[in-house]
Image: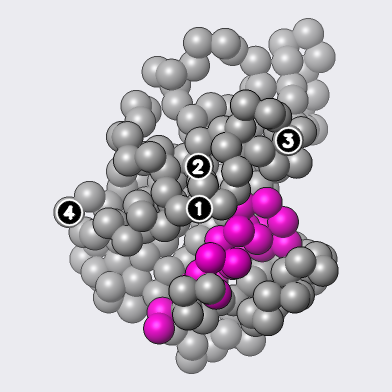
Amino acid sequence: MSTYLVTGANRGIGLEYCRQLNAQGDRVIAVCRTPSEALLQLGVTVKADVDLTNLDAVKQLAQDLQGETIDVLINNAGILERVDLDQLDVDSIRRQFEVNAIAPLRFTQALLANLKSGSKIILMTSRMGSIEDNTSGGSYGYRMSKVALSMAGKSLAIDLKPRGIAVSILHPGLVKTRMINFREDGISPAVAVEGLLARIEALNLDNTGTFWHANGEILPW
């Protein structure tokens, strides 16, 4: 049995991670601000009232978890706010950087003592953070923050490889969640997480720092 910590665990992909990991017999620590009824019904360990942009809350969680080993740290929490060129909302861009890029890096750093050789760090990103793949423009805050997250992941992969800790930057695909208003052309969270767990299983020190699609495709930077 492995111990997985999942942020943004109250709904969507985070909740589905918790559901599938719990079903396969692993221990799950579900981190969120406000737990959903669906999360509470899983019977996993829930750490609520944790705002990842609040340093005091992150420090308190790290203290609560002192001495516990985390085998896989899944940085899943994130926000999407549409920002286009005609209505350039700089406050929104800053907020998305804080939540999508800075918070996962700071959270990972706060929990480094809980990771050991063989542990894995997952950064949930988006294909919208690929510079080469950007053919539609717009979404400035989201795209920029996800590019920054990928750079953080690449640096983490290099810095933590000597400690035996592997890092993966994962795109789940177009998933039918509230973040994208449950688009009909999206795949279900269940299908997405099945692919994501396969990528996590395959992650090792030889492919650390790779930007993967849940279906196994290596995505361009």
Coordinates of residue 182 in the picture (x, y in percent):
73, 35
Mark 4 or 3, nearer chain start: 3
The magenta region covers 1-22
Sequence-wise, the earlier of marks 3 and 1 is 3
Distance of mark 3 from mark 2, alpha carbons? Answer: 14 Å
Q: Residue furthest bottom?
A: 67
- Residue 120 lies in quadrant: bottom left
Closer mark to the observer between disc 4 and disc 3: 3
Residue at 47 percent across and 40 percent down: it is: 171
Which residue is disc 4 drawn over? 206
Tell me the CA gap for discs 4 and 1.
Answer: 23 Å
Q: Quadrant of the N terminus?
A: bottom left
Viewed as shown, does residue 172 lie left or right of 50?
Answer: left
Relative to residue 46, is residue 196 depicted above or below? above
Q: Amino acid at mark 1?
A: Val
The image quadrant of residue 57 is bottom right
Between label 3 and label 2, give the one nearer the viewer: 3
The x and y percentages for residue 83 are 74, 22
Question: In whole angstroms, how far apart are the C-alphas of marks 3 and 1?
Answer: 16 Å
Name the image quarter holding the C terminus. top left
Q: Nearer the viewer, mark 4 or mark 2?
A: 2
Q: Residue at x 80, y 65 (%)?
A: 36
Q: Earlier in the sequence, mark 4 or mark 1?
A: 1
Residue position for label 3: 182
Choose mark 1 or mark 2, whichever is in front.
1
- Mark 4 lies on a secondary structure that is loop
- Residue matched to label 2: 172
Residue at point 56% right, 33% down?
174
**Residue in front for this viewpoint, 50 or 199:** 199
Amino acid at dot 2: Pro
Q: Mark 1 Cα within 10 Å, few/some/many (few <14, many 20+)?
A: many
Does the segment drawn in magenta span residue 51?
no
